[in-house]
């Protein structure tokens, strides 16, 4: 493995042991690691758990509170590990259970918590239950653990209903029965290799309660629940009566998403979690029509946090930002849950590239756009996000200002949606390219054997090594912002902001003695100097009690 660059020293008092912080999740900054793209310890071109473990000091020094690991379970990798073949085993490409144990122990020793992905909506088609269901044929009790149905049409040649896969095409695949004849169909809301569980079957609930306990006993601090709005399907699996169903996602309650029955499952899970010490948590990936429906998932006896996708999709526009911030805080306040804020993850174009392009192109963009503009806005958006009440999520590499890689050759792509005729855009590989650690090397310090997705030329100048200790670099901005956030009493947990009068296009709010101002316009604006400058995403000037804030810049002030 290439030599690890030296990291900046941890800010004084920035690191607390895992046992010291009460209600840590209410103001936590949680760092998402996509294991295959973070660090490769054995030179096979694929990131692994040992690679993550060796880089934990970097994450401690960055100033985050917890690390969320995308799936590392045993899997055929039809969908980058979200097709799980064994929920209690580590895929050999990532290491072993001993590696997972060592990672958890080392993280705790450094004051970091570990959150793992849980994938309860579907399994791999190589999961033992599903293989048994296929082998045993129609009428088998094993088939009741999934959604097997006879087809429509004269000979059962049509899918049981009109549901469409998120990855494109029908949400049903017909099987060949053990006698060689065309047979029943099974439901898969994602790839055909990911059959949906039937959560009406008691064995499914029993299995996942056991899986929870397995990883809790291993010492994990929580679970991010994949497709938390899935699992329960409307009774009778009714037709939706519409084509291009993906356009409806996030706009309405669907017969296969955001059904009220999911909440009974989470109330059972919460009772299990509460048996364990150490304030373990659940985080929901719940795509719902409104933030108000998202709040249902974080009621006091259910989950702790839910991703705020409404915020992630908001344009760099002051009015839109104020609206979604208010709606989020208003929705979370009655249930006593913290708001969460996120700008990037493994499924969307990195926000440096989204903000480099005109508004309205969505969260999957293939255009590089104005790189300098995108980085300037991304830095400003980060300071705004970290100033808001609640918990924040950081996706690996965003602290380096990495853009999406929009020009990957078609032959290297691995996103399963890319290979289907419709559905998701299929270009998620661009945000999954392995991150750079050093200026030089076959993979810029990712590992000694190249990388599973090609990295762009010039990636080394964005590396940890290149940015460490460099005044004004994006990495140092993140380090300083996280240190200030932790040491400033008015930042972190909370459920409200006090909006301040500001020019059009400017977001300004107060939290106690702290003031945040974000200029989302393309021009400099003159504002009152609200006190002592704590941090700014760009160069500002102050004269006679007035501050000149450049375009696309956020400033933190304190009156203390």
Image (cartoon, grey):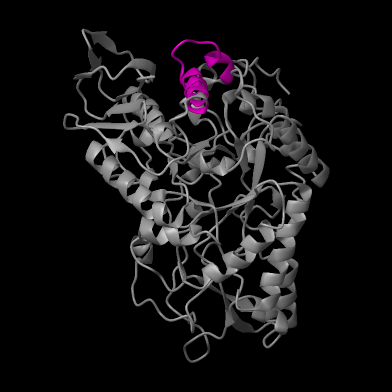
273 horizontally vs 403: left or right: right
114 horizontally vs 396: left or right: right
Name the residue at 26% across, 18% down.
Answer: 550
Q: Position of residue 246 (x, y in %)?
A: 38, 62
Q: Which residues are magenta?
A: 464-486
* 444 versus 159 height, above or below: above
Front residue (pair 474, 9): 9
313 horizontally vs 74: left or right: left
Q: Position of residue 289 (x, y in %)?
A: 36, 61
Front residue (pair 486, 453): 486
Q: Position of residue 430 (x, y in %)?
A: 48, 38
Front residue (pair 504, 173): 504
Q: Position of residue 17 (x, y in %)?
A: 69, 32
Q: Is residue 287 visible?
A: no
* 96 versus 480 height, above or below: below
Residue at the extreme top: 543
Q: Is residue 405 visible?
A: yes
Write down the quadrant of residue 302 in the picture: bottom right
């Amino acid at each position: 493995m290439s030599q690890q660059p030296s990291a900046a020293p941890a800010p004084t008092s920035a690191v607390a042991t895992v046992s010291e912080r009460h209600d840590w999740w209410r103001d936590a900054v949680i760092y998402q690691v996509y294991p295959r793209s973070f660090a490769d310890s054995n030179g096979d071109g694929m990131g692994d758990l040992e690679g993550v473990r060796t880089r934990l000091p970097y994450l401690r020094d960055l100033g985050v509170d917890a690390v969320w690991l995308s799936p590392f379970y045993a899997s055929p990798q039809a969908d980058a590990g979200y097709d799980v073949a064994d929920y209690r085993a580590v895929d050999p490409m990532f290491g072993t259970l001993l590696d997972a144990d060592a990672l958890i122990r080392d993280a705790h020793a450094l004051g970091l918590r570990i959150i793992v992905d849980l994938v309860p909506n579907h399994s791999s088609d190589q999961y033992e239950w599903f293989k048994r269901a296929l082998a045993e044929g129609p009428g088998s009790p094993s088939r009741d653990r999934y959604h097997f149905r006879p087809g429509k049409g004269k000979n059962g040649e049509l899918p049981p209903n009109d549901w469409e896969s998120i990855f494109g095409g029908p949400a049903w695949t017909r099987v060949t029965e053990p006698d060689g004849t065309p047979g029943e169909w099974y439901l898969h809301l994602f790839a055909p290799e990911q059959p949906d569980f039937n959560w009406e079957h008691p064995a499914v609930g029993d299995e996942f309660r056991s899986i929870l306990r397995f990883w809790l006993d291993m010492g994990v601090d929580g679970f991010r629940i994949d497709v938390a709005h899935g699992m329960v399907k409307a009774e009778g699996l009714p037709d939706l009566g519409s084509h291009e169903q993906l356009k409806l996602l996030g706009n309405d309650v669907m017969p296969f998403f955001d059904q009220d029955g999911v909440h009974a499952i989470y109330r059972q899970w919460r009772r299990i979690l509460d048996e364990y010490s150490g304030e373990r948590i659940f985080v929901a990936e719940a795509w719902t029509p409104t933030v108000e429906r998202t709040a249902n998932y974080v009621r006091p006896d259910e989950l702790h946090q839910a991703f705020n996708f409404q915020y992630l999709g908001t344009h760099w526009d002051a009015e839109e930002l104020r609206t979604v911030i208010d709606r989020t805080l208003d929705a979370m306040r009655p249930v006593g849950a913290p708001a969460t804020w996120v700008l990037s993850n493994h499924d969307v174009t990195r926000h440096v590239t989204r903000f480099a392009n005109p508004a309205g192109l969505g969260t999957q963009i293939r255009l590089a756009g104005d790189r300098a503009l995108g980085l300037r806005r991304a830095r400003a958006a980060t300071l705004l996000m970290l100033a808001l009440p609640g918990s924040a999520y950081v996706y690996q590499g965003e602290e380096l200002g990495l853009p999406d890689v929009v020009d990957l050759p078609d032959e290297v792509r691995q996103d399963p949606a890319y290979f289907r005729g419709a559905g998701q855009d299929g270009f998620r590989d661009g945000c999954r390219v392995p991150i750079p650690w050093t200026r030089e090397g076959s993979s810029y310090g990712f590992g000694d054997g190249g990388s599973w997705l090609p990295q762009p030329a010039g990636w080394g100048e964005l590396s940890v090594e290149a940015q460490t200790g460099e005044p004004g670099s994006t990495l140092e901005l993140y380090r300083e912002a996280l240190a200030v956030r932790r040491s400033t009493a008015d930042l972190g947990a909370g459920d409200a902001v006090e909006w301040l009068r500001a020019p059009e296009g400017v977001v300004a709010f107060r939290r106690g003695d702290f003031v945040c101002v974000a200029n989302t316009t393309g021009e400099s604006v003159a504002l009152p100097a609200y006190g002592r400058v704590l941090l700014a995403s760009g160069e500002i000037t102050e004269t006679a009690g007035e501050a000149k804030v450049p375009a696309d810049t956020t400033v933190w002030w304190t009156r203390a």
